[in-house]
Amino acid sequence: MLKIGILALQGAVREHATSLKRCGAEAVEVKTANDLKGLDGLILPGGESTTMRRLIDTYDLMKPLKQFISLDRPVFGTCAGLILLAERIVGSNSCHIGMMDITVERNSFGRQINSFEAPLNIKDIGRGFPGVFIRAPHISETGEGVTALCEYEGRIVMARQNNLLGCAFHPELTGDQRVMSYFVKMVREAAATRPKS
């Protein structure tokens, strides 16, 4: 069975774990560098990106997370997780993990009180996916190797760069497993091509 970690410092950890199990993968909570060992993939969940960054630094996880990504392990960032992955953040001189060639803009769709759900048409996944937006960012620019998978109101809300996947909404808060299944498939394909140790 595939073992997929969830960065468990803050955010919707339990909901991601439930979604992963429904897609046939084992969910592993990641709180230390040691927890990354033996994982086939990793999810960076929603939450508050600045708080998550502070906790990543507190637990000395920045270097191990970058090493994990550099080994071509699939990583999926949702909402705040997307901001953590981005190389550039509008209004900020620095990034967090910064391994995905995108520019993100925070709180693009309003504050928490403006949260909403909208049907999304996602490339390679399908139509009418229930996108849950909570203080969501959007991707304002993509680098050459990045494929935009979904737009909402003319703004990119999901993209992929090789083994990195990011979305501005919360797929784990719906009963629709298509987005999580897509990521699990990415993890399965990457695991199948890895040399056996």
Image: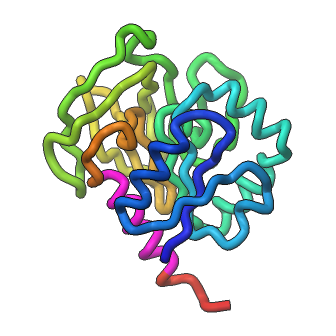
186 or 105, nearer to the observer: 186
Magenta-span inclusion, residue 189: yes
Q: Quadrant of residue 27?
A: bottom right
Number of labels in the image equals 0
Q: Residue at x 24, y 23 (%)?
A: 153
Magenta-span inclusion, residue 26: no
Reply above or below: 155 against 149.
above
| Region of the chain picked out in magenta, as a range | 179-191
Main SS of the magenta segment? helix
Q: Residue at x 15, y 40 (%)?
A: 128
116 on left or right of 183 = left
Q: Residue at x 56, y 83 (%)?
A: 194
Reply above or below: 122 against 155.
below
21 or 180, nearer to the observer: 21
Q: Residue at x 50, y 55 (%)?
A: 164
Q: Is residue 144 visible?
A: no
123 on left or right of 189 = left
Residue 193 appears at what percent x and percent y?
A: 50, 83
Residue 64 appears at what percent x and percent y?
A: 77, 56
Identify the colour scheme used: rainbow
Q: Is residue 196 visible?
A: yes
118 on left or right of 157 = left
Quadrant including the C terminus:
bottom right
Farthest bottom residue in view: 196
Residue 168 appears at what percent x and percent y?
A: 41, 33
Residue 178 appears at what percent x and percent y?
A: 27, 54
